[in-house]
Image (tube, helix red, strand yellow):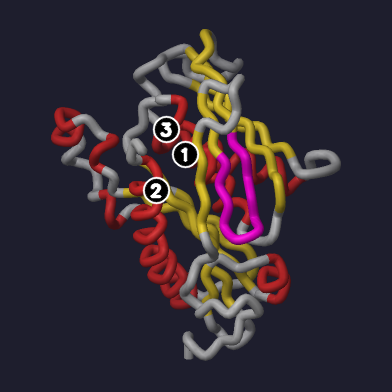
Amino acid sequence: MGMEIDRADGRTANQIRPLSCSRGVLNRAHGSASWSQGETKVLAAVYGPKAGTKKNENPEKACIEVIWKPKTGQIGKQEKENEMIVRRTLQSICLLTVHPNTTTSVIIQVVNDDGALLPCAINAACAALVDAGIPMKHLAVAICCCLGESKYVLLDPDKSEEQKMKASVHLVFPNTLHSVIPKEEESSKAGDEPLECGIITSVAHGTLEVEDYMRCVKRGRAAGAKLSEYLRRSFQPN
């Protein structure tokens, strides 16, 4: 049932769009990256860590703020929600105890939105944090899965596909990139669940039955492995 779907760009249901990532694209930022999946492109810039946390934040930990800049127009409800999701995701992968009482700002600039914008933004933000040398427990990879009327699952939808779908799930998986974690820290985290089975973030829109959600997670995880592999290659020094 999954494979015969005709997609305008000729992809199979499980295929993600061509990926492109460059780091160090902005001179003034402490870290930056551009990330694109097909025609969707996001630029992320990292400034900090700067001394002091935002009010109501725990000074014993580092604070991360995310500022979402749409391609045009004012920031609305959707952008605010995106800021919150990206922020929570980044907080869960960064080692917040390394630079206590500091704030790191992550600016997300939407260059072009042709579907699956939020996962692209998370992928861009992760790459920018690595570029800035912010200490992280592990990287994360984000993917969007959509559910069509006849229950088929499409990965990494473009804008036209997104608009036709009855539900979508944005998933963020830990990238099992052990090179990011110093060896001595790895053993002390033995009590945590293994990274492979974890989901860092899951945001669903529309109505999804549990089995459909589980199918999305399964497809998403397989795509996450491909994204991880791509990240690993793009982060190796040239």
Residue tagged by mark 2?
231
- What residue is rendered at 36% in x and 26% in y? 135
Dot placed on the residue nearer the N-terminal end, 2 or 3: 3
> Where 108 sits versus 229, above or below?
above
Which is nearer the eye, 73 or 55? 73
Q: CA distance from mark 3 to mark 1?
A: 5 Å
User: Does the CB distance between marks 1 and 2 fall below 8 Å?
Assistant: yes
Mark 3 Cα-neighbour bin, 10 Å: few <14, some 14–19, many ≥20 = some
Residue position for label 3:
130
**Residue type highlighted by circle 2:** Leu
**Cα gap from disc 1 to disc 2, whole angstroms:** 8 Å
157 shown above or below 36: below
Residue type, mark 3 in image = Val
Q: Position of residue 202 (x, y in %)?
A: 49, 55
Q: Are marks 2 and 3 in contact (CB under 8 Å)?
A: no
Magenta residue span: 34-44
Q: Secondary structure at mark 1?
A: helix
